[in-house]
Amino acid sequence: KNEVEQSPQNLTAQEGEFITINCSYSVGISALHWLQQHPGGGIVSLFMLSSGKKKHGRLIATINIQEKHSSLHITASHPRDSAVYICAAPAGRSQGNLIFGKGTKLSVKP
Amino acid sequence: DAGVIQSPRHEVTEMGQEVTLRCKPISGHDYLFWYRQTMMRGLELLIYFNNNVPIDDSGMPEDRFSAKMPNASFSTLKIQPSEPRDSAVYFCASSLGRGGYGYTFGSGTRLTVV
């Protein structure tokens, strides 16, 4: 069964800073997911990536399949980016459910 | 598509009462997941279905919890009898295929058992 670890657990940044959140997993996967949850809010899928890099606005996600590692970057961070960011990977090669990291709570100060 | 639709958004009930949560997945998605989220335990998988068939219910806390998916467009999670420790946000999600393509969460149901 896959194990997913995220770091850091908590992150405080000043507005405008470049932010990196890391995720590692133990079992080879077809794709990895990055999710976002605002306080008291729903869970939104940001990225699903299987190789290389994806970009959406100020958010960039990268993955290294060989090293079983992914990063989520936020450029020019803004207070509205404050949320919990969660990475998730398939539980196993033949399983359809996801295993979630414990999340990174990001707080961006103005 | 309207996304994954859950109802109700909020539910307050008394201990011992039956609670039914509902979920409509995205049309065409063949996987449906029920999760529970609490401050203490984070996001936990309760059960998931593939093509309306329960695949893994090992996360269901106990016999008080049951889930059904009578067809591809509807699923229910029932708690009977409810207890205060069941208070949590319950999320439904759906996806296409084993890789989780189009993984989409519903808005969640905030359940409070008093």
Image: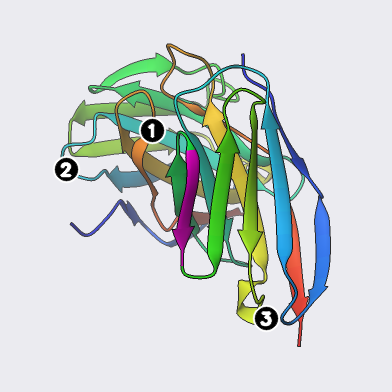
Residue at mark 2 to residue at mark 1: CA–CA distance: 15 Å
User: Magenta residues: mostly which secondary structure?
Assistant: strand
Answer few, some or many: residues within 10 Å of disc 1's Cα (few below 14, many 20 plus, some between 14 and 19).
Answer: many
> In the image, is residue A55 part of the stretch drawn in magenta?
yes
Marks 2, 3 in one chain: no
> Which image quarter: residue B76?
top left
Res B89 seen here: no
**Depth check, front residue: A33 or A68:** A68
* Label 1: which secondary element: loop
**Depth check, front residue: A80 or A97:** A80
The residue that disc 1 covers is: B100
Question: Residue type at mark 3?
Answer: Pro
Q: Is residue B45 above or below residue A58?
A: above
**In the image, which residues are magenta?**
A52-56
Residue at mark 2 to residue at mark 3: CA–CA distance: 35 Å
Q: Chain of mark 2?
A: B
Q: Nearer the viewer, mark 2 or mark 3?
A: 3
Please indicate whether residue A17 sits to the left or right of residue B6 in the image. right
Marks 3, 1 in one chain: no
Identity of the residue drawn at 63% across and 65% down: A74
| Image spot of residue B98 (x, y percent) | 36, 23
Identity of the residue drawn at 64% across and 58% down: A73
| Image spot of residue B6 (x, y percent) | 34, 53
Identity of the residue drawn at 17% across and 32% down: B72
> Residue farthest to the bottom?
A110
Q: Is residue B36 above or below residue B66?
A: below
Q: Nearer the viewer, mark 2 or mark 1?
A: 1
Question: Residue type at mark 1?
Answer: Gly
Marks 2, 1 in one chain: yes
Q: Give me the disc on residue A79.
A: 3
The residue that disc 2 covers is: B27
